[in-house]
């Protein structure tokens, strides 16, 4: 553990690294943890952005293919093998549930168009919920970083200030020169917390807006798909 430095031993403009070295072990651990959280937050933000962008392109491509087809119920099985695409997964669940209800209805001699459509709509709702969770994955962890990072920084500041005043209290003479290094080191944790939280907050809000837009588009697609299945069943 590095020995604390007096203000007279430091250059007039102390660098961030020098202030970090003044911190005690608690402050250094907090700053190190915030650095790790920052790396994780940036990884989540970039990864989620490109994932949502890719899924939106795949969804629109698949929807365009369906719009070019005259009948959805008679499409080949290849259309139901692209489960990685949210729209394709919803389509597969709806069509498979429709024909499963038809097969069971014929066995029990209670087959009806309404029963088939109800099973297809229920499958769409389950698939919609599953894909919504997929869109929102990792967002909770990012929100936790946004709300938790400033408090971690505040904890480090309070701890550092307490340590600085405790160290001064045992000295016969106290001055700003002896107090300033400890206070500067304590305030560094607050800066670190804000540096982590502020970009994460903007990234979280941007991703949240993108996610809500995609979920709304998915709900509209599910409604349109249900309408087409109903029209083809009549």
Image: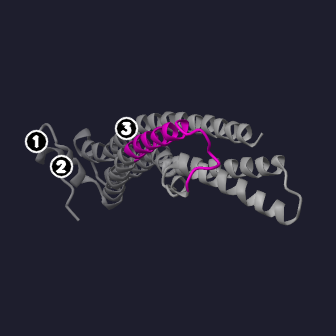
Q: Is residue 136 visible?
A: no
84 in relation to 143, above or below = below
10 Å crowding of disc 1: few (<14), some (14-19), many (20+):
few
Mark closer to the chain start, 3 or 2: 2
Magenta segment boundaries in residue numbering: 48-76
Residue in the image at 42% along x and 40% along y: 57
Rounded to the nearest whole Å, what is the CA distance between mark 3 and mark 2?
Answer: 25 Å
Query: Of the residues tagged 3 and 2, which is closer to the observer?
Result: 3
* Residue hosting label 2: 18
- The residue that label 1 is drawn on is 11
Name which of mark 1 and mark 2 comes first in the sequence.
Answer: 1
Pointer 1 and pointer 2: residues touching (CB < 8 Å)? yes
Q: How far apart, in angstroms, are the residues tagged by discs 3 and 1?
A: 31 Å
Residue found at x 48% / y 35%:
210
Q: Nearer the viewer, residue 149 or 179?
A: 149
- Residue 233 located within the stretch drawn in magenta: no
Q: Split into 4 quadrants, where in the image is the C terminus?
A: top right
Which numbered tag is attached to residue 199? 3
> Which label number is shown at residue 200?
none
Quadrant holding the N terminus: bottom left
Q: Secondary structure at mark 2?
A: helix
Can you see residue 192? yes
Give the SS element for disc 1: loop
């Amino acid at each position: 553990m590095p020995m604390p430095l007096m203000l007279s031993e430091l250059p007039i403009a102390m660098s961030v690294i020098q202030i970090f070295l003044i911190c005690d072990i608690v402050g250094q651990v907090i700053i190190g943890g915030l650095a790790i959280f920052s790396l994780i937050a940036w990884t989540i933000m970039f990864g989620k952005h490109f994932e949502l962008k890719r899924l939106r392109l795949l969804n629109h491509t698949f929807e365009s293919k369906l719009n070019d087809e005259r009948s959805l119920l008679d499409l080949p099985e290849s259309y139901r093998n692209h489960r990685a695409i949210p729209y394709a997964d919803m389509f597969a669940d709806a069509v498979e549930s429709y024909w499963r209800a038809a097969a069971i209805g014929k066995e029990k001699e209670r087959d009806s168009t309404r029963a088939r459509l109800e099973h297809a709509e229920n499958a769409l709702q389950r698939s919609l919920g599953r894909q919504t969770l997929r869109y929102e994955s990792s967002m909770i962890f990012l929100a936790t970083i946004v709300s938790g990072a400033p408090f971690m920084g505040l904890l480090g500041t309070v701890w550092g200030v307490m340590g600085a005043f405790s160290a001064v209290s045992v000295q016969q003479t106290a001055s700003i020169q002896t107090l300033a290094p400890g206070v500067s080191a304590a305030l560094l944790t607050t800066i670190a917390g804000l540096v982590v939280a502020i970009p994460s907050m903007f990234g979280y809000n941007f991703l949240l807006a993108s996610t809500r837009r995609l979920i709304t588009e998915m709900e509209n697609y599910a409604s349109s798909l249900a309408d087409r299945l109903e029209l083809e069943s009549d």
